[in-house]
Amino acid sequence: MSEQQYKMIHCWINGCERSAMIDVRASLTDMLRNDYRLTSVKKGCEVGECGACNVIIDGECFNSCIYLAVWAEGKHITTLEGLMGPNGELSDIQQAFVDETAIQCGFCSPGFILTAEEILERGKIYTDDELRKLLSGHLCRCTGYENILRAVKKTMYARNGKKMPKEQ
Amino acid sequence: MVIGKSLPRVDALDKATGRTKYTDDLCDRGALIAKIVHSDKAHAYVKSVDIKEALKVPGVVKILTCFDVPEQPFPTAGHPWSTDPHHQDVADRHLLTRHVRYYGDDVAAVVAEDEVSAVQAARAVKVEYDVLPIVLDAQEAMKDGAPLLHKKYANNVLAHTDIRRGNYEEAIKEPGLVKVEGWYDTPTVQHCHIENAVCYAYEEAGKVVVVASTQIPHIVRRCVGQALGIDWGRVRIIKPYIGGGFGDKQDALYEPLCAWLSMQVGGRLVKLECTREETFVNCRVRHAIRSHIISYVRADGTMVGRKLECWSNQGAYASHGHGICAKGMNAFPQLYPCPNLEADSWTVFTNRSVAGAMRAYGMPQAIFAVECHTDDICRKLGLDPIEYRRRAVMPKGYVDQFSKNELYSDSFNQTIDVGMKYMDFERKYKEYQNQTGDIRRGIGMSVFWYNTAVWPISLETSSCRMVMNQDGSVQVQVGETEIGQGADTAFAQMAADTLGVPFEKVHVVSCQDTDVTPYGTGAYASRQTYTAGMAIRTCAEDFKAHILKVAFDYTRMQPYLCDIVDGNIVRITDGRVLMSLADLSASVLYSLDSSEHLTMEKTTQIKTNAYSFGCGFAEVEVDIPMCKIKLLKIINVHDAGILINPALAKAQVEGGMSMGIGYALSEKLIYDEKTGKALNNNLLDYKLSTFMDHPHLEVAFVENPEPTSAYGTKALGEPPVIPVAPAIRNAVLNATGVALYELPMDPHLLFRKFQEAHLFAKEE
């Protein structure tokens, strides 16, 4: 194996400055799972179809399986492990997923929660249809999406200091 | 009491924080990687395998081929074993095969230091074949002269069973009968659990250990032992959290091969992880079943004679085999009893991917046929589909002579009432008849039938172990697995109530390890709360009795005067708290006179089964020129007995409805007619429901306690998927007058059927 196959990648992961020699062929999923053992980043298809590997890069969500690790140079990356508070407190959206029974097998949950976080960070109120579209990059086979929608919606209204309208 | 409360899942916190470890998360990064060389022929004999070039790939450790594997065939179905040879699963698999029977069959395996080397080497393996003709359709495969997949099975028929009641041929001679006939086709679909099939294996302490994403660790242990020809006690299966199963992981998948590969490289750690494309092709799929129903009915709809024939497409190997089609057929005479009836079912090998268990085990296929047919009868006779069902469906008090299952409650009428009210069915059904125009609305429904667990077809047994800690908290272990459905939480609720300890003090051990976990067959047949419930209750009651006996030394009170309430020993005569379980268990364990670790373990055999019923309603908008169905409103109503955790129960139903919507409208694994290759084995081209594909999913329950059940529960995990497709189909019938006879009801089908029905009038 040639030396050019490895490159020093320097980035911020969940707020910590990190650097490591990374195989230039590796995906960001591979780097986060294998080099940093951040196993909340899930592999469901490895071609950007299911959304299980989703992470936040500089405030925007990406399927990390189709994002090369070398592109992470200088970037700020958040995985689900980075969402908890310093003393292990759940963030509001994590708590909402627990409270609203939005989790079953849990395999798609990390990706969903991070996309939800990205949406919530915008500070906007979306309609149900808009939320469905914004969340539609993730596949879930357990929940029928119903409780995930409710968890995101509930947190969206709470963050905006508004009362959630009564459900249909 | 916590039964009936919507408590958060016991694993929710870990899953919400990403700390839950699934199989691949646990595997050491130093593992060798196994990759399989799959055939690019759907039917062929392997003449030779040339591994010379592949061995040159740097990092390759070993390459094994179909000429290296053990000779004995083995079964894979996730059924309890039977000591009666006539009831044993068909053993037709080899770890790697010399007779390739589907496109993608396993010919050789590469073990390498890393994934890239393994993939490169697998590509460099050269296989020479004697190519054979293929057959993909079940009825075609039964014809004389069709390519034969397994020598033992003439005309590719794995099994044929039948049912005969009364005299069909004589009965249909009655003058004035109306004949209603239909052919109903369901497609091959896949489970699409988001975690692909994955396992890793290594040798330790004289055993081969396999950590696997499986629903059935104890059964997989037996299958691995059989496949490798080693003592079952030398196999240890560990099941961590799994990312969904839905029946696909109710089979021994690649656990036997992975164990064997590890043993071929000196017991080193070997990981075998399917890609998504492999999960679609090389794991299991749902049987495509074609059903032919003929009903002879009187003018008022009374069924006089009925005939059912169904052909189940098994694919290349037996797996769960005929059980799936037979279950569907067995529902036929029960759901709508008819005195004169003939039913026949065939399960037939073809050169497709192997069909196995999938959520509701043959019933989505069977109920699609039966419930479309029910609406066909109503349409032909001008009967109201609800009123007719109420009249014709299995009546309260019905007893099935084989299973001894009894319909104890008026479940059908009660669930139908709830569904009708929510949908405003009566008004809409009439309003939507005889519409014209491009956009039309319709409403439809379907009832469903399901059993709980597998008795008396197979063994039903469950074991439970309870271990008390010094603080009075309890570990609970059962062989029934958490696969996302929430079983651990329900088990904790049951144990807490029966034992008398707070919910927070019950720790269900989620990970199953066949060296440690008491015997239980796993997660399938919607059996968890029913069968494990019985083991939990038996164990908890005996444990409580034992604890009260032990407590005598400390309280001087007779056991019958005491109870355990909220983690305390309480004298029931006056309600006084005598001591806490924490004090008792610590005192007993550290006693210098009579130390005892408080534990209990019980095995419960289950010799009952329970009917689980309900219905589904759907309202659609059909865009005729666009050949599109938009789902406007949908509800499932279940009588699953008592709900242990209503929020989790509702979530289960929503997930099943979503799967049912995909089955109805978009999902189909497509095979190339010439080569047998799967053409859409990825999550982009295979259309499972996304967030945007359904409206709000409404769920309702009618809770009639099941009299035979330890906690009044019965099947809920699988049934939700069943009524969705026929309800939508009947809604389209109501909207357009066009009866559809196959799934999925996608634009390809609608275009063909609407054209046949001359709905595109302007063009002609």
Image (cartoon, coloured by chain):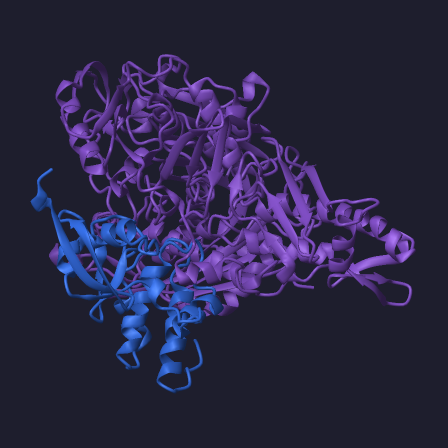
Chain colours: A blue, B purple
Q: Is residue B318 left or right of residue B99?
A: right
Of residue B447 and residue B587, the one placed in the foreground of this image is B587
Of residue B150 and residue A11, the one placed in the foreground of this image is A11
Quarter the N terminus of chain B occupies: bottom right
Q: Position of residue B353 (x, y in %)?
A: 31, 32
Q: How many marks?
A: 0
- Residue at (39%, 45%) from the top-left corner? B26
Specify whether residue B432 is in view. yes
Q: Position of residue B276 (x, y in %)?
A: 27, 43
Please, is residue B520 above or below residue B234 in the view? below
Q: Position of residue B721 (x, y in %)?
A: 44, 51
Of residue B561 and residue B726, the one placed in the foreground of this image is B561
Of residue B669 and residue B335, the one placed in the foreground of this image is B669
Q: Is residue B374 left or right of residue B602?
A: left
Please, is residue A10 above or below residue A15 in the view? above
Quarter the C terminus of chain B occupies: bottom left
Q: Is residue B637 left or right of residue B118?
A: right
Specify whether residue B631 is in view. no
Q: Position of residue A49 (x, y in %)?
A: 23, 53
- Residue at (56%, 56%) from the top-left corner? B489
Q: Quadrant of residue B269?
A: top left
Please, is residue B521 above or below residue B411 in the view? above
Please, is residue B474 above or below residue B326 in the view? below
- Residue at (62%, 62%) from the top-left corner? B504
